[in-house]
Amino acid sequence: MHIHILGICGTFMGGLAALAKESGHRVTGCDAGVYPPMSDQLTALGIELIEGYGLEQLDLKPDLFVVGNVVSRARDGQGKPKYPLIEAILDQGLPYTSGPQWLGEHLLHNPQNPYHVLAVAGTHGKTTTSSMLAWILEHAGLEPGFLIGGVPLNFKTSARLGRGGKGPDSSHPNKPLFVIEADEYDSAFFDKRSKFVHYRPRTAVLNNLEFDHADIFDSLADIQRQFHHLLRTVPSNGRVIFNANEASLQQVLQMGCWSEKEGFGAPPSGAQLNTQNSTQWCAHGPAHSFDVIQGQSVLGHLDWQLSGEHNQMNALAAIAAANHVGVSVTQSIEALSLFNNVKRRMELIGEIPFKGAQEPVRVYDDFAHHPTAIKTTLEGLRHQLDHAHPKEQPKSRILCVFEPRSNTMKLGSMSSLLPDSLSQSDLSFCLTKGLDWDAKDALSPLGDKAFCAQSVPDLVNLVMKHVQAGDHIVCMSNGGFGGIHRLLLNALTKT
C-alpha cells in the first residue's frame, strides 16, 4: 500500500517509515522543519519528504494516513488549525491510524509472518537495554528485527525487519524475533493509550518506573495504570521480566499479572549478596566487571566498556530477556563484552589538547533529560573516573552542560530535583531559554557551582571561562542543543 506519515522525522515515526519501506510499501511523509539526521536517512531510502502539513498533500491519495503523536487539533491565535492536513482528513472521512497501531497490525502481528515481540519498557534505559538485547540476539545468530529510539553503534541503524532467524525457544520455534523500545507516551491525539499497548509482547521487560511526562500524566498512578494495561496483553506462556528493586513495579504486578515472572536486581553497593531473596537474576561486583547470577548459581562474569549501576541493571534485563528465547547466559555475556553502546549515550565527541597540558578536555553527548537519568549518568562517569585514576592524582572534574528541553522539564515539575541530580558534577551550566520557571533559583543550593545562560553562545562562553585541562564536559539534552558540542570543540581548539 501507499502510506503517508504525518510527523515522519520523529525517531519512532522515522523508524516506522524505514520498516514500511523495507516491507515493500510506498512511503511518503511530512513534518514541520524537515530536519537531519532523520531526513537524510529517509531521503537515502527513497522516501519523499514534504515540508509542513499543507492541504496539497491530499493529492497524493495514499491508501492510509499514519499519524504521529506530534499532530494535534491545536489552533493558532487566529483560530486557524496548526495542522490543516489532519482537519481535511477528518472532514473527508479518509482512512487514518496511529503509528503504533499500524506497526502492531501490519508488521509485528501480520498473520502471514508474526513476530515473537520482545518489548522493553521503563522510565529510563529503554533505548540502551533494547540495543543490548538486539545485539545479544544478533550475536547469537538470530538476526532479529528491531525498532529502537536511538542508533545502536553495533548496528548503525535504528530499525530493521531482520531476516527472520528462528529463536531456539522450543515453545515458539517458528516465530522470528523483534525487539522494540516500548514507550509509555500516548499513541496519537485520538488514541491516548500508551504506545506499548499495541505491541502485544511475549517477552516484556519492565526496567524501572517513576513519574515522567507531566504534560500527559497527572501522577505516577496514571503511568502505573498504563503499565498494567501492558501486562494485560502478555499471554500466559509469555514472560514478564521486572526490576525487583522497584516498589512502583511491584505495585503494578499486584494489580494483576497472568504470565511467567522473573525478577532482576543487584544488591546495594558494598552489600553482601543475599541468595535467599526472591530476585532470580542478580549482579555481584562493580558495574564494569561483575558476576551474573541466576538464583544461587554464578553463570558467568562480564567485563565490558560501560559503567554505572544503571547499565549493570540494563544488562541483567537484556540477559534475562534473551534467555527467554533460548540464548544462554554465556552467549549474552560474550555479546555484551563487545557492546558499543548507543549514539548519544555518553558518546565521546572529541578530545582537545588544552593549553599544552598533558590531559585533554573531553566533550561528551548524552541524551539524559530526566533528573534520575542525569544523576545516574553522572554517578557512572564519576565512578569510572575515580576508578581509572590513582588516589594520589588530582580528581578529574566533571562539567555538566544541560538543557531542560523535555515537556516535563519545561513545566518545572521536577526542577527541585536538579541540585541532587547534579551533585556529582563539579560545575553545572543550564540553558534557560524557553523555561517558565526560575532555573537560577532552582539551582541555588549548588551555590557558586551552577551557572545559567539564555542562549547557547552565552553558555559556551561561560563554560570556556571555567574549563581546565583534564575536564570532562558532558552535554545533556534530548534535542540538538543548538550544536553546542561542536561549538565547544571549536572554542577549545582555539585555546
Image (spheres, rainbow, N blue to C red):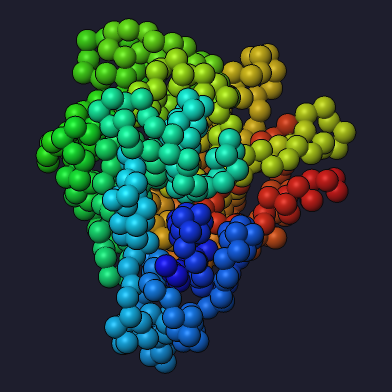
Q: Position of residue 353 (x, y in %)?
A: 82, 36
In the image, residue 229 above or below residue 25 = above
Residue at coordinates 78% horizontally, 29% vertically from top-left?
359
Q: Position of residue 444 (x, y in %)?
A: 49, 49
- In depth, the one of 332 and 252 nearer the eye is 332
Name of the residue lying farthest toward the bottom: 78
In the image, residue 305 above or below residue 285 = below
Could one spot residue 400 in this view of the protein?
A: no
Name of the residue lying farthest toward the right: 356
Where's the N terminus, which quadrant? bottom left
Q: Position of residue 70 (x, y in %)?
A: 42, 68
Residue at coordinates 58% horizontally, 35% vertically from top-left?
154
Which quadrant of the view contains residue 455?
Answer: bottom right
Which quadrant of the view contains residue 413?
Answer: bottom left
- In depth, the one of 253 and 44 nearer the eye is 44
Q: Is residue 415 left or right of residue 160?
A: left
